Image (tube, rainbow, N blue to C red):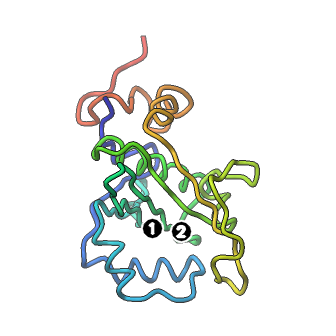
Amino acid sequence: MLFPHTRSRRLELRPASADDRSEFVRTLLRTGIESVTPARARATLDSSAAFLVALRSSGDVVGFSTLHGLDPAGHLRSGLYLDPERAKYGVGAEGMYLTTNYAFAAFPVDKLLGQTTEATFGSIGVTNDDEAKGVLDEHLYFQGRHWNLHNFEVTRSEWNVLVDGRLGNVLGEGLSWRHDPNRTPQRAV
């Protein structure tokens, strides 16, 4: 059983609300996206789950995370939008792990879908060698050029393998994706 952790070693996911829309749009614009319609911003924050992504050390908000588009097939879409000036290396991957785990812990989904461009590969730990499920060539225009849109997915069974393996230290010492985050961490013996 997975638990919906909202804190990792460096980050905290806090519930976002309609009051955060203006900051959400500003964050999107700082990432290089050149236009955001009010309807798109409203729809994104009116999702199944929307979070402010904050640094635990300072409390500073560095971006937003969303889960949206739950469909009858058991698929859910995720989005992670980080301010490139505020987010440090590796924070994107940690935010993505927290969001992905939250999806599988809190929703009856079999697959989580995400999209990104090469512009964000480094911040979320993706490389050109990672296998996208599909690529839409030159699909988006921002930062003065066209970008390929890479589509990724992770299934519940794939996520279960990851949390029991290489993602064990993301939460911090003594914490596990499979234990209640509100209980005292287990100490290594």
Q: Is residue 152 left or right of residue 181?
A: right
Drawn side of residue 156 relative to residue 166, left or right? left
Q: In what element is the residue under mark 2? A: loop
Q: Are marks 2 and 1 in contact (CB under 8 Å)?
A: yes
Residue 62 in the image, given as x and y percentages of width and height: 46, 66
Q: Residue at x 43, y 57 (%)?
A: 55
Q: Residue at x 76, y 49 (%)?
A: 129
Callout 2 crowding tier (Cα within 10 Å): few <14, some 14–19, many ≥20: some
Q: How far apart, in angstroms, are the residues tagged by discs 2 and 1? A: 8 Å
On the image, the x and y values in percent for residue 99 come to 41, 51
Relative to 141, is 80 on the left or the right?
left
- Tell me which corner region of the image, top left, top right, bottom left or bottom right, holds residue 104: top left
The one nearer the camera, 88 or 146, is 146
Q: Which quadrant would the C terminus be assigned to in this image?
A: top left
Residue 78: % across, % down: 44, 59
Q: Amino acid at mark 2?
A: Arg
- 113 vs 59, nearest the viewer: 113
Image mark for residue 63:
1
Q: Which mark is residue 102?
A: none
Residue plotted at (35% across, 85% down) = 39
Mark drawn on residue 86: 2
Q: Residues within 10 Å of mark 1 (few under 14, many from 20)?
A: many
Which one is earlier in the sequence, the residue at label 2 or at label 1? 1
Q: Nearer the viewer, mark 2 or mark 1?
A: 1
Instruction: Give the structural element (helix, strand or loop) at label 1.
Output: strand
**Of the pair 100 and 173, the residue shown nearer to us:** 100
Query: Is 33 situated left or right of 102 in this image?
Result: right
Q: Compared to 133, does 172 lie above or below?
A: above
